[in-house]
Each structure stands twice: as structure tokens, then as C-alpha cells.
């Protein structure tokens, strides 16, 4: 039981990262491999705000998320937009964007290594036990889960109940048809990319309250997020949330029952199963 | 070799002479320059093996570290029992098998899945090896103590380089190579003319993985003490991608143009600015995407094509007058 609750609490944060990535890949068509670095950067900012100015990390999201929004908008407009324009087909854009975001990954990582060094960081925030169903859990994890749920609900409202959100979903389905109904596709793509970055940064700030982080661990998170996105179906927000919860539980189960060193192996086992049996994602339909 | 054109014979002869001259290096220097040359030859083999698969298919494989580490481990586990040549063979089989498994799972799908899968593969294998060793083995490290010195490793790598180039040449003129060129140009067309695209890709990936496994096996005596984090170092995968793309993957010898400058540059940077390696790798990726999308080789080919066209224009104008 405690495995399921811990897994769900972890999965909540994973869900935000994965939803961020699925927006970037599903709408802006950029496989952003630097997403994990974006997250770690946000963790460091939250750490710095907490230790230097005692700013509550959950409130700090109000600063971190807009900051990440602007940063990702600039990255999309100046680094990735030219690649979209020059690509002759989807395949070439894929290769170009993978290489370019690898470049971003290492540049971000290099800057953070210079700024913070290679050491591990963590801090004490809301480190109190909360009893749930007979077992104790850290209040920071519970708070992070609730904050993630609130952000996810806000995102759902934006995507399904506003004009801009509908435009973004239309671009995800078919960019060329979206143009026919007077949607500014480049603008919607930039917006989706920036929102995706902001979501990931928000989850980075939440994660930093209960997780020990260092400058070079972004890749691990990118990979988990990618696996979640593929499991859930590219561009599918509901699928990403469900897949994130499954991954959170599977990882916690393997870490407690078998060995904490085998979490990647657990994610990979799930990944292979999905690739072999449902490569279109949990809710995805088989392409015609 | 039957049916080689005069030009191909000449290239082969020049290659053989160059190889023979390079093999003399340990007689001149046994210190820094041999070490550097060894690194260069190692990356030449790795990048050429990588290009063998990724050049025609445009799939970006980050599995190099996994194959390399598997090869290293094959030697580390068996060095006290079996002779090295047999272990090298086992490493080739192990690398090939791993490539086959990965290929069957991912190569039927789009390129993104493949990149992601290979990105984590080295980490996955590392975790499994660590777990096996701590639970069923005797501690984490393994010793590889042999009589092989750097110059022997260097010679073995040179020989391997010759084999890789020969294999690449043979693949290029085989049915498989022809099929790969069609797949690289347009996969839909390839499928329509009856090529089993998934099968061809898997076969080529297996060849590539087997060679990388052999490199890992040959390098094992150099490390002498082997641990999972050093054997499965993900940096190898990224460096191989950068060097190959920097050189250009349109031809088999393209990576050579990237490997030599980048190995020397990276050697200097790890020596003098060890904290800046990530930044350099990041900038190298950016340079490839924005400045050299087809590598140094592609740039050179484009320029010479342009020059030829200009010359024709000039000739045409003269004739018109």
C-alpha cells in the first residue's frame, strides 16, 4: 500500500514534467532533450531562493514558471524556429532538433556545473510526517503532489476551455489544417513550447523540496519524461498523466522490493513493453 | 578481390601504405604521442562503425557506450580463463546480440524512439551489471592484467580499422548497401520496391554494434581496473556522434575529418579546462546543426560543386562570345 501511495505522490511530479514535454513535442514538434536541464535549473533557482531569501519553494513557482516561459519562448524563437523553417520534411526536423537540443542540454549543464559544481544539493522544507492510510509520508511530498494537481487542473482548463488552448490542440492534431481556420501556427507552437518549459520548471521547483539534485542529473529526468510521453501517446495530456502515475508506482515498487539501483531498468522494462505492444500509446489509436 | 576498379585499387594501396607507416609510430615514441594516436585510432574505428549504420539511415545512435562496455566486460570476466583473441570474438557476438535486441525493439518505429532508447541503454546495462555484480559477483571492480602494452593495443586497433574500412567497402557494394541507400533516400519507396527495411536496418546495426564491442574488448587491457561507471561512460556515445557528424557521414572516410581535430581539441580541454567539457560538447552540437549540417566533408563537396558550376558558367560565357 505504501508503495502505491509513494508511487502516486512521485508520479504527480513526473506527470507535470511529461505534460510539459508532450506539449513541446506534440504541438511544437520539437523533441526537447534539454527538458531535464530546464528542470534542474529550476531546482537550483528554488534552492537559491529558499536558502538566500527564505522564499517558500511552492510560492517561488510564481516567479520560476514565468521566467522559464520567457526563456523557452526565446529558445524557440531564436534557436529552434530557424530549424523548423529550413527543414524539408518531418524526419530532417527531427534529426536537427534532437542535435540542437542536445547542444542546449550540454550548454545548460556546463553553465550549471560552472555555477554550482558537481556536488549534490538538497534542503529542508516541510520535512514533517503526515499519516495517510496507516503509514507516514513527508509533508513536502504531499504538498508537491497537491501543487502539481492544481497546476494540472489549471492547464486542463486552459487547453479545453479557452480559445488559445483550443488553437494549441488544433495544431497538435494537424498543423496544416490549423492554418486553414486562421490559427497562427508559429505563434501557437511558440506558446506551447514556452508553456511546456514553464510546466517543467514548476515541477523542478516542486521536486527540489524532497529530492536531492545535482547539475548533471537532468538527462535521467528527460528520459523518464520521454518514456512517459511515449507510453501516454505523443501530444496526449490525459495519457501522459496516467503513464506518469504508472511509472511512479513501478519505480517505487522496484526500488523498495528489488533494488534502488534498478529504477532505470524498471522504466526500460515498461518502455519495451509499450514499444512492442502499444507503440501508439495507452489511449492512442493505431494510425491508419 | 575480384572486380575492383583501378581507382579503388589505388585507394586500397594508399590506405595500406598509410597503415604501415602509422604502425611504425611506437618505434618513434612510446609516450604522449602514442597515447594520443591510440585515442585517435580508437575513435576512428568507433566513428566509422557508427557511420556504417547511421550514415545511410540517419538514425542517431547513442548506444556506443553500451556496446563498448559490453565488450570491455566480456574481456574483464574471461581474461583469466580464455585467450584474448577468443574473448574479442565473444565481445563481437555480445555487442551484435545487444544491437539485435535493441534493433528489433526500436528500428521498426520512428527515429525519435530509437534515439531515446539508445540514450538510456548504456545506463540500463550499467545498472544491471552493477546489480549483478553486487548480488552475485565478488565486489564491483574487475582486474584485467595482461602483457599487452599500449603499442600492442594500438596495433590491434589499426588492424581493426583496416577491417572496418574493408567491411564498409564490401557492404557498400552488396545488395544490403544498395538497399540502405534507397532506404536513406526514401523509406516508403524502399518498402514499395520490396526491401525488408526493418531487417536491413537491424543487420547493419548488428554489424556496427559488433565492431564497437570489439573496440571495447581491445581497450580493456588499457584500463587494467574495470568498473561499471568507467566502462559504460555515456560521454563516449556523445563524442562519437559529434566527431562523425563533424566530419560528415556521406562517405565512409568522412568521420576521419572530424575525429582527428576533435580528439586533439578534447585532449587539450580535458587537460587544461576540465570543468568546461560539457560546454565544449554543447557548442560542438550547435556548430554541427547551424554551421556544418553535412560536416566538413559535406561543406567541401558543396564548395567544390559550386566551383565547378562557376567554372562551367565562365566557359559558357567565353564560348558565347
Image (tube, rainbow, N blue to C red):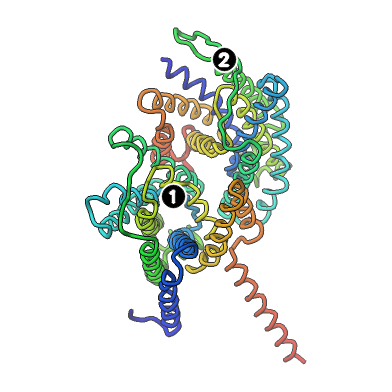
Image point 51% across, 47% down: which residue? B112
The image shows residue B287 at horizontal and vertical percentages of: 64, 56
Q: Which residue is mark 1?
A: B65
Quarter of the rendering occupied by the N terminus of chain A: top left
Does A35 sit above or below residue A14? below
Question: Would you call the spot at circle 1 few (<14 residues within 10 Å), some (14-19), or many (20 or more)?
Answer: many
Near-viewer residue (B293 or B159): B159
The answer to whether dots 2 and 1 both sit on one chain is: no
The image shows residue A256 at horizontal and vertical percentages of: 39, 23
Specify the quadrant of the image occupied by residue A105. Answer: top right
Label 1 marks a residue whose chain is B
Is residue B137 rendered to the left or right of residue B257? left
- Where disc 1 sits, the SS reads helix
Label 2 marks a residue whose chain is A
The answer to whether one can see residue A56 in this image is: yes
Question: Would you call the spot at circle 2 few (<14 residues within 10 Å), some (14-19), or many (20 or more)?
Answer: some
- Where disc 2 sits, the SS reads loop
Is residue B26 rendered to the left or right of residue B259? left
Image point 46% across, 63% down: which residue? B31
Near-viewer residue (A141 or B314): A141
Specify the quadrant of the image occupied by residue A75. Answer: top right
**Is label 2 in contact with label 1 (beta carbons under 8 Å)?**
no
The answer to whether one can see residue B175 in this image is: no
Is residue A179 rendered to the left or right of residue B195? right
The image shows residue B285 at horizontal and vertical percentages of: 60, 53
The image shows residue A166 at horizontal and vertical percentages of: 67, 33
Q: Which residue is mark 2?
A: A127
Does B97 sit above or below residue A238? below
Determine the CA span between mark 2 and mark 1: 39 Å
Specify the quadrant of the image occupied by residue A109. Answer: top right
Near-viewer residue (A283 or B91): B91
Amino acid at each position: 500500500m505504501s508503495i502505491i501511495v509513494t508511487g502516486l505522490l512521485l508520479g504527480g511530479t513526473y506527470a507535470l514534467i511529461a505534460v510539459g514535454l508532450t506539449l513541446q513535442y506534440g504541438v511544437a514538434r520539437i523533441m526537447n532533450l534539454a527538458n531535464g536541464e530546464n528542470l534542474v535549473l529550476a531546482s537550483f533557482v528554488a534552492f537559491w531562493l529558499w536558502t538566500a531569501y527564505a522564499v517558500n519553494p511552492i510560492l517561488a513557482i510564481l516567479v520560476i514558471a514565468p521566467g522559464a516561459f520567457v526563456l523557452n519562448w526565446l529558445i524557440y524563437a531564436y534557436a529552434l524556429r530557424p530549424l523548423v523553417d529550413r527543414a524539408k520534411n518531418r524526419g530532417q526536423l527531427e534529426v536537427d532538433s534532437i542535435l540542437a537540443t542536445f547542444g542546449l542540454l550540454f550548454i545548460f549543464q556546463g553553465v550549471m556545473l560552472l555555477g554550482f559544481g558537481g556536488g549534490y544539493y538538497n534542503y529542508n522544507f516541510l520535512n514533517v510526517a503526515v499519516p495517510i492510510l496507516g503509514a507516514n509520508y513527508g509533508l513536502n511530498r504531499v504538498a508537491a503532489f497537491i501543487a502539481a494537481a492544481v497546476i494540472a487542473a489549471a492547464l486542463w482548463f486552459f487547453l479545453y476551455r479557452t480559445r488559445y488552448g483550443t488553437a494549441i490542440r488544433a495544431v497538435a492534431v494537424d498543423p496544416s489544417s490549423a492554418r486553414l481556420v486562421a490559427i497562427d501556427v508559429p505563434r501557437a507552437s511558440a506558446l506551447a513550447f514556452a508553456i511546456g518549459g514553464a510546466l517543467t520548471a514548476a515541477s523542478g521547483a516542486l521536486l527540489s523540496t524532497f529530492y536531492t539534485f545535482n547539475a548533471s542529473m537532468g538527462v535521467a529526468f528527460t528520459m523518464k519524461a520521454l518514456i512517459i510521453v511515449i507510453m501516454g501517446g505523443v501530444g496526449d495530456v490525459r495519457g501522459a498523466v496516467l503513464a506518469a502515475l504508472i511509472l511512479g508506482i513501478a519505480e517505487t515498487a522496484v526500488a523498495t522490493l528489488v533494488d534502488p539501483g534498478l529504477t532505470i531498468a524498471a522504466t526500460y522494462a515498461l518502455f519495451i513493453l509499450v514499444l512492442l505492444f502499444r507503440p501508439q500509446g495507452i489511449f492512442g489509436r493505431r494510425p491508419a | 578481390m575480384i572486380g575492383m576498379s583501378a581507382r579503388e585499387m589505388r585507394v586500397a594501396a594508399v590506405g595500406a601504405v598509410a597503415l604501415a607507416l602509422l604502425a611504425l609510430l611506437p618505434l618513434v615514441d612510446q609516450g604522449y604521442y602514442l597515447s594520443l594516436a591510440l585515442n585517435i585510432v580508437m575513435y576512428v574505428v568507433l566513428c566509422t562503425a557508427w557511420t556504417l549504420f547511421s550514415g545511410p539511415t540517419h538514425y542517431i545512435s547513442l548506444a556506443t557506450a553500451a556496446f563498448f562496455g559490453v565488450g570491455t566486460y566480456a574481456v574483464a570476466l574471461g581474461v583469466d580463463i580464455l585467450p584474448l583473441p577468443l574473448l574479442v570474438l565473444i565481445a563481437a557476438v555480445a555487442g551484435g546480440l545487444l544491437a539485435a535486441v535493441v534493433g528489433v525493439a526500436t528500428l521498426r518505429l520512428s527515429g525519435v524512439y530509437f534515439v531515446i532508447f539508445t540514450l538510456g541503454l548504456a545506463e540500463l546495462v550499467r545498472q544491471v551489471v552493477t546489480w549483478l555484480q553486487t548480488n552475485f559477483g565478488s565486489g564491483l571492480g574487475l582486474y584485467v592484467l595482461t602483457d599487452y602494452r599500449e603499442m600492442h593495443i594500438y596495433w590491434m586497433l589499426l588492424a581493426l580499422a583496416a577491417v572496418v574500412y574493408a567491411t564498409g567497402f564490401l557492404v557498400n557494394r552488396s545488395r544490403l548497401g544498395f538497399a540502405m541507400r534507397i532506404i536513406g533516400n526514401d523509406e516508403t519507396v524502399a518498402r514499395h520496391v520490396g526491401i525488408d527495411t526493418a531487417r536491413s536496418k537491424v543487420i547493419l546495426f548488428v554489424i556496427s554494434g559488433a565492431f564497437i564491442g570489439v573496440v571495447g574488448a581491445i581497450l580493456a587491457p588499457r584500463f587494467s581496473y574495470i568498473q561499471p561507471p568507467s566502462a559504460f561512460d555515456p560521454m563516449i556515445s556523445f563524442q562519437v556522434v559529434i566527431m562523425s557528424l563533424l566530419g560528415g557521414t556521406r562517405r565512409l572516410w568522412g568521420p576521419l575529418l572530424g575525429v582527428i581535430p576533435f580528439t586533439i581539441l578534447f585532449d587539450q580541454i580535458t587537460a587544461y579546462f576540465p570543468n568546461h567539457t560539457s560546454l565544449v560538447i554543447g557548442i560542438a552540437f550547435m556548430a554541427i546543426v547551424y554551421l556544418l549540417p553535412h560536416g566538413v566533408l559535406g561543406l567541401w563537396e558543396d564548395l567544390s560543386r559550386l566551383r565547378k558550376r562557376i567554372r562551367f558558367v565562365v566557359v559558357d560565357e567565353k564560348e558565347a562570345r
